[in-house]
Amino acid sequence: MKLPRGFLASGIRAGIRKKRPDLGLIYAPNGANAAAVFTQNRFQAAPVTLSKSALKKSGGRVKAVVVNAGCANAVTGQEGMDAAKRVRERAAEVLKCRQDEVFLASTGVIGVVLPDKKIRESIPDAFTRLAAGGVEAFSHAILTTDIGPKVAQSSFAIGGKRARIVGVAKGAGMIHPNMATMLAFVMTDAAITPAALQRAVKDAVDQSFNSISVDGDTSTNDTVLVMASGAAGNDSDADLTAFQNALNKVCRDLAWMIVRDGEGAIRVMELEVSGARSEKDARLAAHAVATSPLVKTALHGGDPNWGRILAAVGRSGARFSLKKISLTAGNITLVKNGAPAQYREKDAARVFARERVALHLNLGSGTASAVILSSDLGHDYVSVNTDYRS
């Protein structure tokens, strides 16, 4: 796969991790308009703080994105901030751009200061390896506990021109709706203003990355960055409907990959909550079910134990009708009007044994709705996270 026009990428091993590639670079030779959303965790990593400031100072312009795996550089005080600044300074020097045009992102262990010397010494190598087809190398270089890379693409028409969009993400653990819940870098060759990009990325994130959960934890480094090179040649005031649809699709595809790759996951629950009094009520119910360890372990075992689902809804704080609430799994009605429905256990178990388990919960109280994706929780999740630092 090649990147959209106006972008190059590479991925190399800088030595932060023991064996795997750990340094990714995206470069827009002519620069790109950009917008981003970041974690709402109060312990925001040094690269998050610096990238927020840089985007504001540059007026939404980015020329280079430097991403490292193996070290989050979060909760590292001034020492970690200084290390990130040295990386930014070196990247600006090699790529011949302003420091506020360099966007930083990190992922890995929290509480460890970034070994910035290794990165600074490796940036020239990453620069020489830049290529339009470098998306594969980049996608591997940003992984942590992911089983594999996550890349999605789409094409669209804008202002009479053909344009493409390519997104790359990483994430398998510390995944929960509270902005982005991972790292994602989305590139398009369409010409779009920073302000329009900001509105577009918020809309896309709300229906994708903010609607997934693996373990209920929100990282200190969450970032979604969208960049537009303008190489497609369209007018920047063109109708953005097709672009928004393409962006939404790419983000939803990446979000699905993240949940399916949830540490140790074998199933994904696609939960639709309808009949809520408000969107807030719908989300309260959805999040309670999606993050319940009892629901997630039952999902892992393929057990249609719907009592756990309703118990989670009951403690969620969402308003609902006890006499009208209903639950279906696939085409099997499990609960109808607040009481057990007539169904065969083996039919329900067959639905819960699928890779995608579609559930529909109707709260019976209104017209608002919400959708969330959540992975199961099994033995491998404990194993992965027990051994994470070793």
Image (cartoon, rainbow, N blue to C red):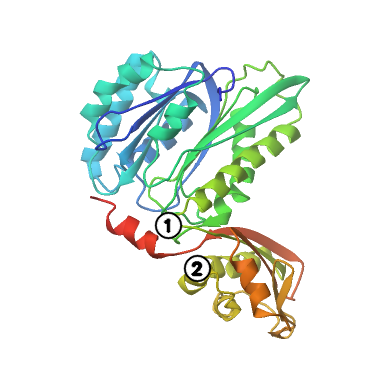
What amino acid is found at the position of numbered circle 1 in the picture? Gly
The residue at 71%/19% (across/down) is 234
The residue at 61%/64% (across/down) is 283
The residue at 27%/35% (across/down) is 19
Q: Is residue 357 left or right of residue 266?
A: right
Rendered image: mark on residue 349: none
Q: Nearer the viewer, residue 208 or 39?
A: 208
Going from the N terminus, do you reach mark 2 or mark 1 first? 1
Rendered image: mark on residue 296: 2
Count the labels in the image. Answer: 2
Q: Is residue 234 left or right of residue 41?
A: right
Q: Residues within 10 Å of mark 1 (few under 14, many from 20)?
A: many
The residue at 62%/19% (across/down) is 230
Rendered image: mark on residue 264: 1
Task: Find residue 197 and report its horizontal and vertical position in percent.
Answer: 61, 33
Element at badge 1?
Answer: loop
Element at badge 2?
Answer: helix
Task: Find residue 146 and report its horizontal and vertical position in percent.
Answer: 42, 45
Q: Is residue 359 left or right of residue 139?
A: right
What amino acid is found at the position of numbered circle 2 in the picture? Lys
**279 relative to 93, above or below:** below
Can see residue 225? no
Q: Is residue 117 left or right of residue 286?
A: left
State which quadrant residue 106 falls in: top left
- Extreme front residue here? 346
Task: Find residue 261 and report its horizontal and vertical position in percent.
Answer: 48, 50
Q: Nearer the viewer, residue 360 or 54?
A: 360
State which quadrant residue 54 falls in: top left
Looking at the rendered image, the quarter that the N terminus falls into is top right
State which quadrant residue 238 falls in: top right
Task: Find residue 334 and report its horizontal and vertical position in percent.
Answer: 69, 78
Viewer-side label of 2, 1? 1
